[in-house]
Image (spheres, rainbow, N blue to C red):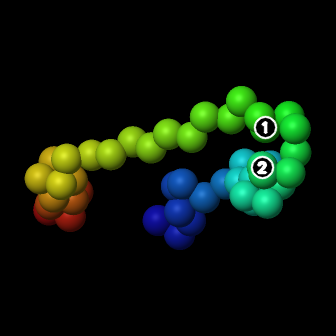
Amino acid sequence: MSERVCSHKDQNFHIPQNIVDSDSKFQNLTKFAFIRDPFDRFISFYLHIC
């Protein structure tokens, strides 16, 4: 792969924290994260390489 799959060319995809803190339209912004099981990640990585 010559280009990362998760790279985004849209400038509005990533919003700097200082803009989020100062702008009133982001008052109800909810942040979340997806966390995978480390063993599951290892198996996925291993199967991808092999």
Residue farthest to the top?
28
The local crowd at label 1, few if under 14, some if 14 to 19, many if 20 or more residues have their Cα within 10 Å, is few
Q: Amino acid at mark 2?
A: Val
What residue do we see at 87% from left, 38% from top? 24
Residue at 56% x, 65% y is 3
- Answer few, some or many: residues within 10 Å of disc 2's Cα (few below 14, many 20 plus, some between 14 and 19): few
- Seen in the picture, residue 34 relative to 14 is either above or below; the reply is above
Q: Which mark is residue 2?
A: none
Q: From the viewer's side, name the closer residue of 31 and 8.
A: 31
| Foreground residue among 16 and 1 | 16
Horizontal side, residue 1 vs residue 8: left or right:
left
Q: Is residue 13 left or right of residue 40?
A: right
Identified at 20% across, 64% down, the residue is 49
Left or right, residue 2 beside residue 12: left
Nearest to N terminus: mark 2 or mark 1: 2
How far across and how far down the image is residue 29, in percent?
68, 35
Q: Secondary structure at mark 1?
A: helix
Residue designated by label 1:
26
Tell me the element at label 2.
helix
| Residue 8, quarter of the rendered image | bottom right
The reply to whether callout 2 and callout 1 are in contact (CB within 8 Å) is yes
Instruction: Give residue 45's quadrant in the image.
Output: bottom left
Q: Residue lying furthest bottom in this view? A: 2
Residue that mark 2 sits on: 20
